[in-house]
Image: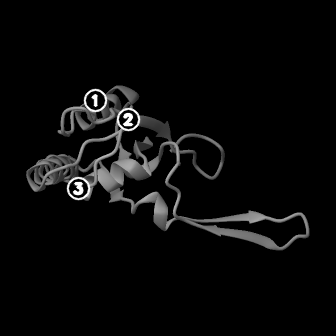
Amino acid sequence: MKYLVMVQGTQADYESMSGKPSAQSPAWSEKDMQAMFEFMGAINNDLAESGELVDAQGLTEPAKTRTVAAGKDGRPVITDGPYGETKEVLAGYWVLDCESLERVTEIAARVAQCPAPEGSTEYPVVIRPIQDAAGGEC
């Protein structure tokens, strides 16, 4: 079965990873960033070896977001960032093909242990089954 495993963050989190602290997140050092990338790389390598990894990507900061909505007149309403006050947004994801919900939960629990500077906001790792074209789960 396929699952989408998601990690969350805010604009302030992305800024702190660039060395700009905020009330919500302390500044990350180069060593902190290296530890996070090594940790995530090890997870990706293990998932690729097990054959469970379908795709994994980190996403750019919310300030680089573009939102397109249907306007009342039928024309699109386009909004560009930055969004300094955003709530949590999708920061990165994995698409995994796992034998069970229990297995993907084990993986999500590992992802939740990602190293971060003390005082950083801890976000839950979200698991969603992927629906196939017929409406069932993949």
Whichever of labels 1 and 3 marks the residue nearer the N terminus, that label is 3
Residue drawn at point x = 36 percent, y = 39 percent: 23
Q: Nearer the viewer, residue 110 or 53?
A: 110
Assign a secondary structure to mark 3: loop
- The amino acid at mark 3 is Gly
Q: Nearer the viewer, residue 125 or 73?
A: 73
Disc sitting over residue 19 in the figure: 3
- Residue 18 against residue 118 in the figure, above or below: below
Assign a secondary structure to mark 1: helix
- The amino acid at mark 2 is Val
Residue 54 appears in the rendering:
no
- Residue 12 against residue 119 in the figure, above or below: below
Q: Position of residue 2 (x, y in %)?
A: 43, 44
Whichever of labels 2 and 1 marks the residue nearer the N terminus, that label is 1
* Residue furthest out toward the right: 73
Residue drawn at point x = 49 percent, y = 38 percent: 128
Disc sitting over residue 125 in the figure: 2
Marks 3 and 2: in contact by CB < 8 Å? Answer: no
Marks 1 and 2: in contact by CB < 8 Å? Answer: yes
Disc sitting over residue 109 in the figure: 1
Q: Quadrant of residue 80?
A: bottom right
Q: Quadrant of residue 26?
A: top left
Q: Position of residue 37 (x, y in %)?
A: 17, 54
